[in-house]
Amino acid sequence: MRLSPPLADPLRIAAASLWLPARRDTAEAALAAGRVDGETATRLGYRELTESLDLAPPEMAVRAARDALDAAGWDGASVDLVAHAWICHQGHDFWSPASYVAHHMGASRALALGVQQMCNGGAAALETAVARMIADPRVERCAVTTADRFLAPDFDRWQGDYETAYGDSGTALLVDRHEGPYELLSVATVARSEYEIMHRDEAAFSPAPRTLPLDVRRTKRAFVASGGKERFAATMTEAVGEAVRAAIADAGLTPEEPRLRFLTLPRLGSSTLEEFFRPAMDRLGLGRTEILALGGGTGHLGAGDSAANLADLYADKRLEEGDIALLLSLGGGFSWSCIAVRAVG
């Protein structure tokens, strides 16, 4: 999705906010309690995971959204659309968490949309908001939020999945037509839907939400046993490269562009990043672009990795005027996205 043209000027990201709970589940504590073994902890590479014992995911999204509104100097009532993404239980069944976020951030009259694209939901929600802004000139401002919480016994944050551990968070991006510290240059997405089976296997469809703990490892074991691992590994490297190249091209750039300052990786475990992402990065010829893995102190944040990474770049003042960052994410199903943003004065 190239954003300029058809717009005379690129859309802006007016604020990027990451809200994290104060509680941390450290790798040291998890090792001592036997919740993760030493070999697994080393492969994962996380120092600690963020943990919310009190706030539900939509409440964390509201905290992030309010912080973003304050940073941008916006009133919540000025927001025309709220797109909220998540991967796990939001606190109630048969209910709209997106509408809760809109209501409690002061945007009750905004259209509230829920976006479920697994861990690529943040990028998918941003694409949804941008497409609406392009199609409808009356939509001036959008909020894109994510939030997830991974609590036992429903989910084992350290060992519920292979090669990734999960942290709790809320994130928010505010998108404006005219003002903000970042120009939104492009959003590129690549899809390979045949891999939805990796999170399903051949089990029968259930008639109601599951009451047993989530076991992501079970479905992945079945996928590996079917002989799909090698084919997926090749697809992963190919799709990562395709998404990044498309985002760069749609932004009117080349991989050798000296202003491409950073590429942020999803907050997956270290072994996954080394096995699947580093080879793709090596083939892209990105020149002096620095590849950043920023999840060591949080864990994988579900749908919120890209927004969290931009929020961290902004908080650390790592982008100077004219610098461009690429924000890479992926989600089960499968899809891969890359967002290109440029810092402005």
Image (spheres, rainbow, N blue to C red):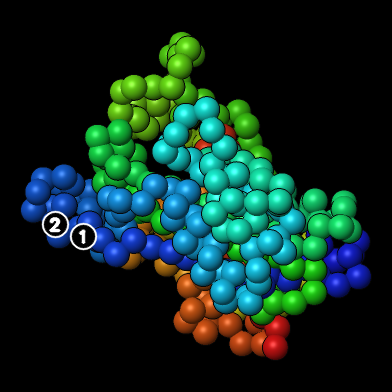
Task: Describe residue 129's horizontal placement relative to residue 264 as left or right.
Answer: right
Determine the image quadrant of residue 145: bottom right
Judge the density around disc 2: few (<14), some (14-19), many (≥20) Cα neighbours within 10 Å.
few
Q: Residue 47: which quarter of the image?
A: bottom left
Q: How far across and how far down the image is residue 245, in percent?
A: 70, 59
Q: Residue at x 89, y 58 (%)?
A: 137
Q: Position of residue 124 (x, y in %)?
A: 65, 48
Left or right, residue 232 beside residue 22: right
Q: Can residue 42 be seen in this view?
A: yes
Circle 1 SS class: strand
Quarter of the picture holding the C terminus? bottom right
Q: How many labels does the image show?
A: 2
Closer-to-camera residue (92/169): 92
Residue 185 picture location, percent across and down: 75, 68
Nearest the camera: 118 or 171?
171
Three-letter amino acid code at disc 2?
Ala
Looking at the rendering, in which quadrant would you find the N terminus? bottom right
Q: What residue is disc 2 on?
A: 29
Name the residue: 85% across, 66% down.
4
Q: What residue type is labelled 1?
A: Thr
Instruction: State if disc 2 and disc 1 touch (CB < 8 Å).
Output: yes
Q: Is mark 2 on a helix, strand or loop?
A: helix
The circle drawn on residue 34 is none
Closer to the camera, 313 or 22? 22
Residue 332: percent from left, percent from top? 52, 38
Q: What residue occupies the far left of the structure in this picture?
A: 32
Tag 1 residue: 26
Above-or-below relation of 227 to 344: above
Q: What crowding class fits label 1: few (fewer than 14 Cα within 10 Å), some (14-19), or many (20 or more)?
A: some
Q: Could you tell me which residue is drawn at 55 percent across and 46 percent down? A: 100
Tell me the distance, in whole angstroms, between the alpha carbons under discs 1 and 2. Answer: 5 Å
